[in-house]
Amino acid sequence: MDTFLLIWLIVIAVMLVIEIFSLGLTTIWFSFGAVAAAIVAGLSGPLWLQVALFAVVSLVFMALVRPFAVRIVNKGRTKTNIEEVIGEKAVVIEKIDNRNEKGKVMFRGVEWTARSRDDVEIEVDETVTIQEVSGVKLIVSK
């Protein structure tokens, strides 16, 4: 087996494995380019043509096919825009006590588990500012 053909087959395998673990449609395009290069290598084509085909096919697939593939993959995904709550105000409805892992706030009519960013206790009915979201908890400060 030709050395360059073997190299391209390894590139294909590595790119596919990376894509399987990342699921981000980032390396699959290089697999297509490597397939084109492997075909040329199998036909004993020159190395410059293999590399050129690898680059061109990878870029073409990335530029033309990726936008459609991303739309299909993300079709059922709901955007949450959770970052927009940072800086908003909430009202404490259960005393926030990080040591005892207690505390709740009311934000936009929804009850959230809350923790103090500064590790201070915050009493009921105090207004707090949301500093970050950690899982299903709001991290707040006075």
Image (tube, rainbow, N blue to C red):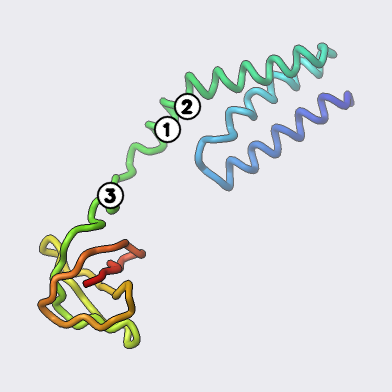
Within 10 Å of disc 1 (Cα), the crowding (few <14, some 14-19, many 20+) is few
Which residue appears at 55% of the width and 17% of the height?
Answer: 60
Q: Is residue 10 left or right of residue 23?
A: right
Q: Residue at x 19, y 83 (%)?
A: 95
The residue beneath circle 3 is 80
Q: Residues within 10 Å of mark 2 (few under 14, many from 20)?
A: some
Amino acid marked by disc 2: Arg
The quarter holding residue 58 reads: top right
**Residue 61 placement (x, y as % from top left):** 54, 21
Q: Nearer the viewer, residue 23 or 88?
A: 88
Q: Quadrant of the C terminus?
A: bottom left
Disc 1 + disc 2, Cβ < 8 Å:
yes
Give the alpha-carbon distance from disc 2 to disc 3, as whole Å: 23 Å
- Residue depicted at 23% across the width and 58% down the height: 87
Residue indicated by mark 1: 70
Relative image position of residue 90 (x, y in whole percent): 16, 66
Residue 66 - label: 2
Q: CA distance from mark 1 to mark 2?
A: 6 Å
Question: How many numbered marks are there?
Answer: 3
Q: Earlier in the sequence, mark 3 or mark 1?
A: 1
Can you tell which quarter of the image residue 29 is in? top right
Q: In this image, 138 relative to 74: left or right?
A: left
